[in-house]
Image (cartoon, rainbow, N blue to C red):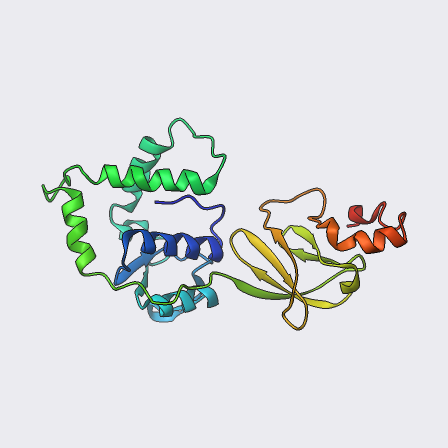
Amino acid sequence: MLLCKSQNAECLIEGMQRIFEYIGGVPTRILFDNMSSAVAKILPKGKRKLADTFSRFVIHHKFKAAFCNPNKGQEKGSVENKVGYKRRNYFVPVPAVRDLSDFNENLLMLCDEDIKREHYEKKALISKLFKDDLKAMLPLPKEHFKVTRLEKVKSDNYSFARFENNRYSTAPQYNRCEIWLEISADEVLVLNDKYEEVVVHKRFYGQKTEPVIDWLKYLGAISRKPNSFKYTYRQG
């Protein structure tokens, strides 16, 4: 079990990949809800068109992605009960998360401790059942899957690029032009039309009142025209 900042594709896939690597294998079949981060479109006869990044992740790890029917939560078996169990045992009272990576490391250790109890139905240690399951899992792929996606955007008059609810700075020479954003769960990497790195930003969730700016990229322009950037970052 891991906490993620969002249910977007980057967070979903990064979390799954981290769990695969932690347990040392890949399940042969995984059941999912019809979340937009995994499913681009529900097709007739129970088929699904997978979201691009998720589809590549599935192919890379060679597992079968199965999906519940819409509005049929009971098809997930005891998953909801397990969610309630985890919530009561690990999130009551609500914890303060100062470092998500450290918090997740601790969660994984708590899960390791939790499987030392007996399974309610099979009357065997969960840790023993897990070892049996692990023998049937697929091996980890040799190459690490890069959990990012590319989006082409156009910068505004002030060389800011808009992504989701926020504006990210590029560099003065990239105003009113097409650029690429390489997006991961934690970062927004700005690339020029030759796919060269311009600047790397921390990815923000929610909406900031001001743009995300790396001022070092603007020092040359500011030194030439000190007053030109006085109100720039407040432009909408």
Q: In this view, does 30 lie to the left or right of 37?
A: left
Quadrant occupied by the N terminus: top left
Residue 196: quadrant of the picture: bottom right
Which residue is at a point 42% across and 43% down the rendered structure image? 3
Query: Residue 125's spot in the image, x, y percent?
Result: 13, 42
Which residue is at a point 38% across and 45% down the rendered structure image? 2
Which residue is at a point 25% across and 49% down the rendered structure image? 77
Query: Residue 156's spot in the image, x, y percent?
Result: 77, 60
Query: Residue 173's spot in the image, x, y percent?
Result: 79, 64
Which residue is at a point 50% across and 34% down the rendered structure image? 98
Extreme left residue here? Answer: 123
Question: Is 129 above or below relative to 36?
Answer: above
Q: Is residue 79 left or right of residue 206?
A: left
Q: In this view, does 11 lie to the left or right of 225?
A: left
Query: Residue 90's spot in the image, x, y percent?
Result: 34, 33
- Residue 44 appears in view: yes
Q: Which of 66 and 159 is in front in this view?
A: 159
